[in-house]
Image (cartoon, rainbow, N blue to C red):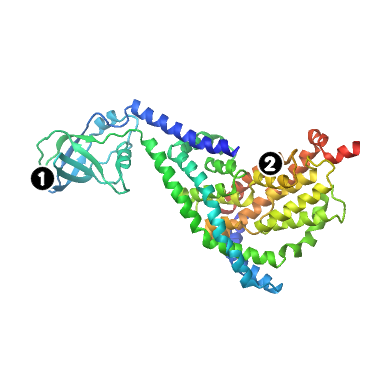
């Protein structure tokens, strides 16, 4: 059963990017959008976005780099591993779970750091990348959305958001294990 | 919160490095003061006049273990290859950067400027050398505060990595943002909204039927599903403003507002974030499935969490909608 699922996923996965690459322009064409001009206009922002995230990447990457180099990361993993192993979660993904709700660009840096450490193909990288893709920067979203309408009493927004993040975190680990393990 | 975590990482790194360094000094892990006994032999014969010649270094298993009990090397190789270099200051053994036993491997990486640099050791005194194994004392460069050195080095390296990584993302980011812009302009979100709206309605009980608030809520959530980050935020703020109009107590969030937020942060992703595509490249093809599946769970959790918590007495009491009914 799982084998079939994995086969289906691995075959379908060849079509993901191509269908995005073709799907959007085709749909745009159908709707009468000047696709070329609009694409170029959107692509202009690529440079802006890349430059904007640099300070965030520097902030998180150098701190994580120091943490790794000092040996503290290995220590943390050694301490957490026996506990987390009981529920099947590798300790290496824990920093992502902590940082993801707080900073989007910073957690992107974390994914990049894990790629350097464990290689693009590793399960660990697939797990953190799935976490990155499946949850939002909860605190940022709360600040922006509630800030826009001057809400001060946020009631259960933070616990509800963090609960969803937590489930997304756990689900990412198991889904990656299921699909690629 | 982030401030504390970030500062914590840095301070904790420093503390951890310092403790490791001091422990190593106290336990005398590295042969900083003393020499390490070894035997050298010359596979091609000893030439007293040669400036450089191949040398083979052997460590006695028992002596080595008793000197470095903490590192307890699993197996010492029978010998290590290197080069004997005659310098003005004496004779120097340069061990090739292969698999060296600890702590020698660490000494090597500490003194090495580049990855492949050999491990340098001075031969103590001036023993008479010849072809056969000759016992010598090797003096290595002292290793102190290596972790201090490591964390400083890591900070510099990673800062550089961060900038070059981000610049490397420009191309793919541009590609994704261009595509997404087409989706935006083509009204992808609006086209789907009327199918989704009826499904969302029961989740926002505070919004009267046919009130425009629900339309904006739907648009915001759909924009999230399609990874249209730039479009999602203004739509979300618009939706919040609409919900705020229905809110009798302007400083307190309603259940509907919390539901919108919870669904927003956990929403199903059909188009992966542009930044992730830039980082992962073609690997994103496979991750599409894991992300979609994981977000399915987190969405359900977000909805159940927001609904469940709103039923708690504590949050029911602070519900602005109910307070209006009481008054």
Q: Mark 1 or 2, which is nearer the eye?
A: 2
- The Cα–Cα distance between marks 1 and 2, rounded to whole angstroms, is 72 Å
Residue B96, image x, y percentages:
25, 46
Please tell me how crowded label 1 is: few (under 14), some (14-19), or many (20+) other residues with Cα within 10 Å. some
Between B55 and A40, which is closer to the camera in this rendering? A40
Between A94 and B101, which is closer to the camera in this rendering? A94
- Observer able to see residue A11: no
Q: Quadrant of the N terminus of chain A?
A: bottom right
Between B131 and A39, which is closer to the camera in this rendering? A39
The quarter of the displayed image where residue A70 is located: top left
The quarter of the displayed image where residue A87 is located: top right
The quarter of the displayed image where residue A3 is located: bottom right
Image mark 2: chain: A
Disc 2 designates what residue?
A163
Image mark 1: chain: B
Left or right of B292, for residue B45: left
Disc 1 designates what residue?
B46
Residue B291, image x, y percentages:
62, 53
Tell me the element at label 2: helix
Between B87 and A2, which is closer to the camera in this rendering? B87
Please tell me how crowded label 2 is: few (under 14), some (14-19), or many (20+) other residues with Cα within 10 Å. many
Left or right of B305, for residue B149: left
């Amino acid at each position: 059963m799982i084998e079939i699922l994995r086969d289906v996923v691995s075959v379908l996965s060849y079509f993901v990017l191509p269908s995005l690459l073709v799907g959007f322009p085709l749909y745009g064409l159908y709707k009468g959008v000047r696709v070329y001009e609009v694409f170029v206009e959107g692509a202009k922002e690529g440079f802006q976005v890349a430059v904007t995230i640099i300070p965030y990447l520097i902030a998180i990457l150098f701190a994580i780099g120091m943490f790794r180099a000092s040996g503290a990361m290995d220590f943390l993993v050694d301490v957490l591993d026996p506990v987390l192993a009981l529920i099947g979660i590798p300790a290496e993904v824990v920093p992502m779970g902590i940082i993801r709700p707080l900073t989007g660009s910073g957690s992107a840096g974390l994914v990049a750091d894990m790629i350097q450490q464990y290689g693009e193909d590793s399960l660990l990288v697939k797990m953190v990348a799935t976490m990155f893709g499946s949850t939002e920067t909860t605190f940022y979203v709360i600040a922006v959305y509630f800030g826009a309408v001057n809400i001060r009493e946020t009631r259960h927004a933070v616990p509800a958001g963090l609960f969803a993040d937590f489930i997304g975190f756990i689900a990412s680990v198991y889904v990656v294990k299921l699909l690629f393990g | 919160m982030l401030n504390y975590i970030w500062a914590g990482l840095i301070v904790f790194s420093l503390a951890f490095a310092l403790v490791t360094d001091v422990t190593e000094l106290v336990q005398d892990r590295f042969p900083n003061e003393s020499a390490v006994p070894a035997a050298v032999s010359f596979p091609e014969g000893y030439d007293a006049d040669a400036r450089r010649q191949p040398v083979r270094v052997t460590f006695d298993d028992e002596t080595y273990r008793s000197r470095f009990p903490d590192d307890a090397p699993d197996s010492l190789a029978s010998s290590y290859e290197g080069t004997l270099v005659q310098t003005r200051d004496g004779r120097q053994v340069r061990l090739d950067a292969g698999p060296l036993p600890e702590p020698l491997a660490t000494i090597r990486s500490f003194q090495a400027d580049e990855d492949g640099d050999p491990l340098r050791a001075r031969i103590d005194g001036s023993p008479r050398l010849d072809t056969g194994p000759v016992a010598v004392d090797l003096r290595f460069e002292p290793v102190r505060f290596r972790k201090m050195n490591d964390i400083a080095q890591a900070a510099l390296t990673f800062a550089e990595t961060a900038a070059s990584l981000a610049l490397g993302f420009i191309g793919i980011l541009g590609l994704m943002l261009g595509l997404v812009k087409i989706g935006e302009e083509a009204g992808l979100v609006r086209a789907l909204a009327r199918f989704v709206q009826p499904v969302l309605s029961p989740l926002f009980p505070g919004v009267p039927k046919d009130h425009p608030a629900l339309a904006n809520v739907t648009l915001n959530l759909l924009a999230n599903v399609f990874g249209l980050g730039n479009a999602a935020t203004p739509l979300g703020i618009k939706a919040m403003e609409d919900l705020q109009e229905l809110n009798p107590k302007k400083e307190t969030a309603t259940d509907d507002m919390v539901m919108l937020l919870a669904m927003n942060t956990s929403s199903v992703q059909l188009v992966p974030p542009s930044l992730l595509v830039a980082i992962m490249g073609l690997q994103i093809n496979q991750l599409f499935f894991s992300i979609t599946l994981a977000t399915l769970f987190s969405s359900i959790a977000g909805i159940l969490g927001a609904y469940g918590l709103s039923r708690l007495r504590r949050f029911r009491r602070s519900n602005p909608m109910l307070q209006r009914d009481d008054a």
